[in-house]
Image (spheres, rainbow, N blue to C red):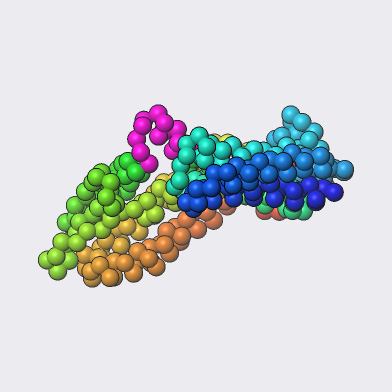
């Protein structure tokens, strides 16, 4: 009966999310979308009668530990999946009916995945509670970074998504790269164009007496990688240590600095190759070598910081930390 309820809730969530994506695909069938949302709500409401857990879970994760301070574990069985459905319903209704937006963005995928992860939270075995917690926390922090913060900044300042990313790319990536290349003896120029046509950030360099231009997009600016690292690191340490303290804060700060620096190094090497060998070589390094440089830096940092944090905790992987035992 529990499994049946979870499947009904999952089906209802998929109907609500499907209405959102159908709207973005340009199929302006608002009546069909409203029917899908309504059907999803009916299935979700009906499923709540079947989601009660008959026995205690043998193991549970951080999310249940937090919520069980305010309600019983049996109630968590209903609340967590319904939180996911309500998130999908609220987001879809707001985007389709209130805003009437027709552009499918990264934020829609993130919110949808977070909602779905909450809906199916209890579908997996309780022995994998830490894995499920990591997924939910990771998607939650991604939502905070790429949806809540960006949307709040947009509402407060009135600046468009294009301008927000353009300024961030220019001051955090383009200018540092150009400044360091100048110090290394390479003549390059940073340009910021906010005319709305093409990429706003451009670096000009010379190869064989020809002036070439390299556009810096969001994907290669490091903004996404910083947000991804921030979300993954916090989700990892919360799942592993079940707390936030000064040591974890230091690790997060160093990690963000390493993320930024590794991306700057990647861009510097890429442009140096372009100056020496031209645009085809630059494109090859950017597409294949650059990502290896970035991943190598993050991997080394992650191994070192986890060893350092484990040493600070005076624990070894596989054993419960004192904080985990008390939770």
Q: Is residue 17 in the magenta section?
A: no
Q: Residue at x 40, y 48 (%)?
A: 223
Q: Who is closer to the viewer here, 185 or 18? A: 18
Toward which corner of the image does residue 90 lie, by quadrant? top right
Left or right of residue 320, residue 23 in this image: left
- Residue 256 seen by the camera: yes
Q: Position of residue 20 (x, y in %)?
A: 55, 46
Q: Position of residue 19 (x, y in %)?
A: 58, 47
Kindly give the residue lying farthest to the left in the view shown.
209
Q: Residue at x 81, y 39 (%)?
A: 49
Q: Residue at x 19, y 59 (%)?
A: 205
Question: Where 128 falls versus 250 (above or below)?
Answer: below
Q: Who is closer to the viewer here, 205 or 245? A: 205
Kindly give the residue lying farthest to the right in the view shown.
54
Q: Who is closer to the viewer here, 319 or 273? A: 273
Q: Position of residue 174 (x, y in %)?
A: 28, 49
* Magenta segment: 148-161
């Amino acid at each position: 009966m529990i499994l049946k309820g979870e499947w009904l809730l999952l089906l209802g969530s998929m109907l609500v999310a499907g209405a959102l994506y159908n709207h973005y695909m340009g199929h302006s069938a608002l009546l069909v979308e409203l029917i899908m949302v309504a059907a999803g709500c009916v299935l979700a409401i009906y499923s709540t009668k079947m989601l009660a857990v008959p026995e205690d879970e043998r193991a549970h994760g951080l999310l249940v530990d937090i919520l069980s301070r305010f309600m019983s574990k049996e109630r968590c069985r209903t609340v967590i999946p319904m939180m996911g459905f309500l998130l999908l319903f609220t987001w879809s209704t707001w985007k389709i009916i209130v805003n009437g937006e027709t552009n499918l963005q990264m934020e829609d995928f993130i919110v949808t995945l977070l909602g779905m992860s909450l809906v199916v939270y209890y579908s997996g075995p309780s022995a994998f509670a830490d894995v499920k917690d990591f997924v939910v926390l990771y998607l939650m922090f991604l939502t905070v970074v790429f949806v809540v913060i960006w949307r709040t900044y947009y509402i407060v300042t009135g600046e468009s998504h294009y301008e927000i990313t353009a300024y961030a790319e220019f001051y955090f990536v383009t200018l540092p790269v150009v400044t360091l290349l100048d110090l290394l003896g390479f003549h390059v120029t940073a340009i910021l164009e906010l005319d709305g046509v093409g990429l706003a950030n451009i670096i000009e360099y010379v190869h064989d007496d020809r002036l070439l231009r390299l556009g810096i997009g969001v994907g290669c600016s490091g903004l996404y990688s910083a947000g991804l690292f921030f979300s993954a690191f916090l989700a990892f340490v919360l799942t592993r240590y079940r707390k936030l303290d000064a040591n974890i804060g230091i690790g997060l700060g160093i990690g963000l600095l390493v993320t930024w620096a590794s991306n700057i190094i990647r861009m510097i090497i890429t442009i140096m190759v372009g100056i020496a060998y031209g645009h085809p070589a630059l494109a090859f390094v950017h597409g294949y070598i650059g990502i290896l440089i970035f991943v190598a830096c993050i991997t080394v940092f992650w191994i070192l910081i986890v060893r350092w944090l484990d040493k600070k905790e005076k624990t070894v992987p596989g054993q419960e930390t004192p904080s985990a035992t008390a939770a």
